[in-house]
Image: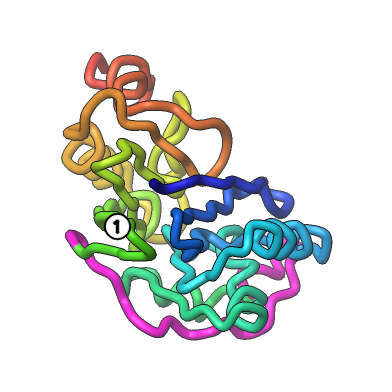
Amino acid sequence: MIQIKKFAFNAFQVNTVILYDETKECIIIDAACYEDSERKELVEFIKNNELKPIKQINTHCHVDHILGNNFVKEYFGTDLEIHKEGEAFLKNAPQHGISFGFSIEPLIEPSGFINDGDIVQFGNSSLEILYTPGHANGSICLFSEDQKFVIVGDVLFYGSIGRTDLPTGNFDLLKQSIHEKLFVLDEDVKVIPGHGPDTSIGFEKNNNPFVGLGN
């Protein structure tokens, strides 16, 4: 059974998520740790629970979500996987980070790319990749059908959606992604966003003021 641990890291309070199961293998999603204290918190949790990180994944490659990529690679030796369409954001991150006060060294390159419909496996567990552009090219969600949760990055939030005024953002495309990839899931599926509290597919379908089906 998959266990979920969330951390809120850096000034943007990005939800970094660790998923692990009874085998102790784990994956790290959106390694956003920037300060030394945040890196220490991540490492201590993994060590205290005797976990073995086998890969890291970015839901998308906006600068606030990738601040810990290099550290996780250097400390744990975990390769990075992203959607191909997000690669340009990684390449531009050092320059882009300056505008937000982040000092970022050139980032590690992905070891591989993940696509819509791919299955990510760790331990005895698996997740399906859903490609959901609109907030940013390369945005993916990770869906557990068995345990009814989906990690959505900045695609969907509690009562809100990801902004669409940044490069490659497109409201109509984001709405399409949400309706065709997320709102077709069962209403009791838990939604774990890239910022803020968890929500559910049913709640957002019925109440989200931007993309809810009543709007």
Quadrant hosting residue 160: top left
- Would you name the residue on which mark 1 appears? 126
Residue 153 horizontal side relative to residue 127, left or right:
right
Callout 1: SS: strand
Residue at image location 74% in from the left, 64% down from the top = 39
As drawn, the residue found furthest toward the right would be 37
Q: How is the image coloured?
A: rainbow
In the rendered image, the vertical position of residue 186 relative to residue 40, given as above or below? above
Residue at image location 40% in from the left, 84% down from the top = 111
In the rendered image, the vertical position of residue 176 relative to residue 142, given as above or below? above
Residue at image location 69% in from the left, 52% down from the top = 9
> Residue 151, position in %: x, y?
40, 46
Label total for image: 1
Quadrant hosting residue 214: top left
- Residue 174 or residue 182, whichever sits in front: 182
Query: Which region shows up in magenta?
Result: 95-117
> Residue 16, position in %: x, y?
58, 53
- Residue 41 or residue 136, whichever sits in front: 41
As drawn, the residue found furthest toward the front would be 22
> Residue 157, position in %: x, y?
46, 34
The C terminus is located in which quarter?
A: top left
Is 47 a magenta residue?
no
Within-10-Å neighbours for mark 1: few <14, some 14–19, many 20+: some
Residue 65 horizontal side relative to residue 123, left or right:
right
- Prevailing SS of the magenta stretch: loop
Residue at image location 38% in from the left, 20% down from the top = 209
Residue 31 horizontal side relative to residue 163, left or right:
right
> Residue 159, position in %: x, y?
45, 24
Residue 40 horizontal side relative to residue 200, left or right:
right
